[in-house]
Amino acid sequence: MDGEKNGDEMKIKISSSFSGVISRGSYENSRPGFSAEVETEMAEGDDLIAFTNNVQKDLQKVCYENFKACEEQAVVERVTKERQDIRFYDCPECGKKHSSVSSITGWDADFFVPPHELQQYASQGNLYDLQAKHFIETGKWEPVEKIEGSWTDLVILKKGNLKLSVNGWNFPAF
């Protein structure tokens, strides 16, 4: 920040920047960076620190929003490259790209799991999580049936058509 007094006003330059890594974009670990600088005048008697802080926050917001737009574009480019069956259109209202509804309809047809089976897998995961947390808290590895809070998920697994294991793993041995 440079400052120069001119009568009752002080002319100052304030700058801010933002850079980051986009790890899931079209190019691995893309590193776009943005900076912004403004030359402005500050009235005599204004708090220099507060004024500078406010302007820097505004400038940093501009830089960050540019970074987020760059990240979004990189993700769209990656998906477009990997999934040529998905089409994107520019949205005039928000200025962003959106996928075509007809190109994503049925995208999961090859690995569809009915909701009642998905619930069984989720319940099994809940029980494994509950059992691991219990072990970490108490140091005891107990059958999940003996752990408070397991009843609902146990019923779902025992009544489910997949007949998934309730105690099919050993966290301490892992």
Image (tube, rainbow, N blue to C red):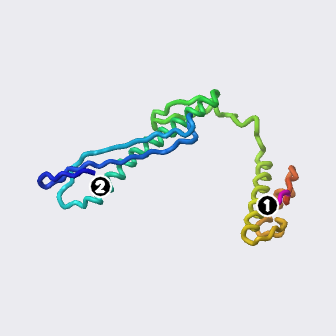
Q: Element under label 1?
A: loop
Residues at marks 2 and 1, CA–CA distance in whole angstroms: 54 Å
- Is residue 171 found inside the magenta-colored segment of the image? yes
Counting residues from the start of the chain, the first of labels 2 and 1 encountered is: 2
Q: Position of residue 32 (x, y in %)?
A: 46, 39
Write down the residue under mark 2: 52
Q: Quadrant of residue 132?
A: bottom right
Residue 26 is left or right of residue 134, and the answer is left
- Is residue 10 found inside the magenta-colored segment of the image? no
Mark 1 and mark 2 in contact (Cβ < 8 Å)? no
Residue drawn at point x = 81 percent, y = 67 percent: 141
| Placement of 122 over or under 22, stated as above or below | below
Q: 124 or 54: nearer the eye?
A: 54
Q: Give, as a single range, the part of the protein colored magenta.
A: 168-174
Q: Amino acid at mark 2?
A: Thr
| Furthest residue toward bottom | 138
Residues packed near mark 2 inside 10 Å, few (<14), some (14 to 19) or many (20 plus): some
